[in-house]
Image: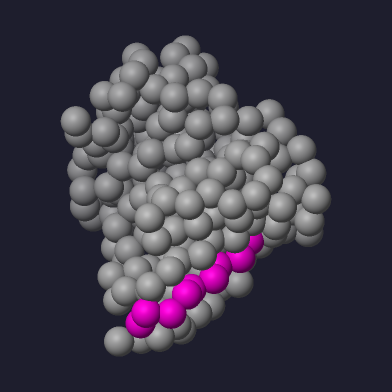
Amino acid sequence: QKEVEQNSGPLSVPEGAIASLNCTYSDRVSQSFFWYRQYSGKSPELIMSIYSNGDKEDGRFTAQLNKASQYVSLLIRDSQPSDSATYLCAVRGRDDKIIFGKGTRLHILP
Amino acid sequence: NAGVTQTPKFQVLKTGQSMTLQCAQDMNHNSMYWYRQDPGMGLRLIYYSASEGTTDKGEVPNGYNVSRLNKREFSLRLESAAPSQTSVYFCASRQGWGQPQHFGDGTRLSIL
């Protein structure tokens, strides 16, 4: 079983709509969860951190965490063409080890 | 504030050559990491240093060595480069327990 799983995409979303990106993880003791955005040819950039169950909002981004279901998601409201990128989910598990998913490619359609 | 700085940004090597990738961070972070990223493979951890004076193997350490020179600097060395090591290499750092990693801009390495 893969430790952090994401749908590779591409996920195509019309401009102005809500993009929903999902991530599941296998280690039940995971405590910290991160979303990174990576533009083509660039390095990963941290956009959200979430540590407790529920929602965390930052501008157009909302991270959602459900530890019982071992599920974390990222919602992007009012999607813009500049949101087109690969989104990486990262999970901190036992021994403070951070595991990255392979990422979901998001394409915002103008 | 520069964050995490990697040098060089691009490099082409011949099989068998050696080189060292440099990484420095100015955020006073305790932990530093080296990853490689290949198409379809995601980020794979090569080596990491949880604190100054310590280094540990990650998922794909074979063919690499590292040195944590001081708290700021963490270098990655390829002793005898192979075409399979053609990749984009990222250095990252983080403050400590539970904190996220911050990445450098990467080094694009091609081995012919």
* Rendered location of residue B97, percent (x, y): 56, 25
Q: Give the range drawn in magenta.
A: A15-23
Say left or right for A6 vs B5: right
Say left or right for A102 vs A24: left
Q: Which colour scheme is used?
A: one colour
The residue under the point 56% across, 44% down is A50
Does B81 sit above or below residue B64? Answer: below
The residue under the point 61% across, 65% down is A22
Q: Quadrant of the N terminus of chain B?
A: top left
* Residue B84 visible (yes or no): no
* Rendered location of residue B70, percent (x, y): 34, 14
Say left or right for A4 vs A87: right
* Rendered location of residue B37, percent (x, y): 44, 56
Instruction: Choose between B74 and A40: the one closer to the eye.
Output: A40
The residue under the point 31% across, 42% down is B104
Q: Quadrant of the C terminus of chain B?
A: bottom left
| A37 magenta-colored | no
Could you say which quadrant of the image residue A21 lies in? Answer: bottom right
* Residue A22 visible (yes or no): yes
